[in-house]
Amino acid sequence: MAIQRISTGIPGLDSLLEGGFKRNSINLIAGGAGCGKSIFAMQFLVDGLKKNEPAIYITFEEKKKKFYEDMAEFGWDLEKFEKTGKFVFLEYTPEQVKKILTEGGGIVESIIEKIKARRIVIDSITSFTLLYEDELEKKEADLTLFELIDKWNCTGIMTSQDESRDGHTISAAVEFEVDGIIMLYHAKKKGVRVRALEVLKMRGTKISPKTIAMDITPKGVVVYPKKVVEM
Ligand SMILES: Nc1ncnc2c1ncn2[C@@H]1O[C@H](COP(=O)(O)OP(=O)(O)O)[C@@H](O)[C@H]1O
Ligand SMILES: [Mg+2]
């Protein structure tokens, strides 16, 4: 059976992924602070919302008012989407998410069912993982979260705070469990920061070995698939 693809909503990126994310896959967007993870994740949801695919954004990092303001800069009216009942923004503490896990879905599951969410973002998995000190506990929590998302039939993005260049700080359980990993870079070259993107992993997809130029424009994240960046 042919793999069903869902657009990432990022101009230039789908062509690198044989058409986009796999439907119902969970994808990690990893990178350092300010490299564009939250914008990327929201852009993926806005793409869905424009196609009438309801979406939910769960965050431990962003404050709603500020986030809505920042996203309005890209022409994304999140308040409007919220009013149509197709978009929910959840500002959650990691403890609240912990509760969802122990309740096997809890309030998040009822919201997802109510709005019939097809796309989900968790920003970030790093803050969530930091809740657990014990490695085994951490792994179990990650797996429970993955099982839930799987059950919800959504295509998902998780962001991961990662300052290292080769992705070694991503929790091992998450790295193996996700269907895809995309690294975002904002690296200094000769005194100037350059943005770039690299697809590290994408199940069922032939990926490019190249690190590609990326930019954050007035319309959001844009990728230039033909422009290779020397890192
Ligand atoms: N309207 C905008 N136009 C261009 N670049 C922007 C705009 N808003 C934010 N940025 C860039 O995006 C960065 C923040 O991106 P964000 O997705 O919040 O990063 P992360 O979530 O990876 O920490 C800012 O530091 C800035 O460089
Ligand atoms: Mg962020």
Image (cartoon, helix red, strand yellow):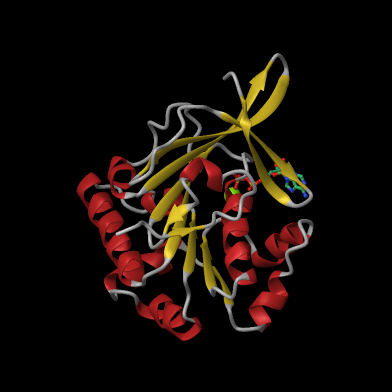
Which residue is most to the left? Answer: 136
Query: Which residue is painted at 59% across and 18% down in the image?
Result: 230
Q: Residue 14, image x and y in percent? A: 54, 48
Q: Nearer the viewer, residue 214 or 99?
A: 214
Identified at 29% across, 40% down, the residue is 172
Give x and y (percent) for residue 109.
Answer: 39, 78
For this orientation, the residue located farthest to the top is 190
Q: In the displayed structure, does residue 39 sit left or right of residue 175?
A: right
The answer to which of 178 and 33 lies nearer the viewer is 178
User: Residue 12: x percent and y percent?
Assistant: 62, 43
Quadrant location, the C terminus? top right
Lateral position of residue 230 relative to residue 161, left or right: right
Snapshot quadrant of residue 143: bottom left
Residue at the image point whose x is 54% and y is 73% from the top? 53
How many marks are shown on the rendered structure?
0
Q: Position of residue 29 (x, y in %)?
A: 49, 45
User: Vertically, is 147 above or below 202?
Assistant: below
The residue under the point 28% across, 71% down is 102
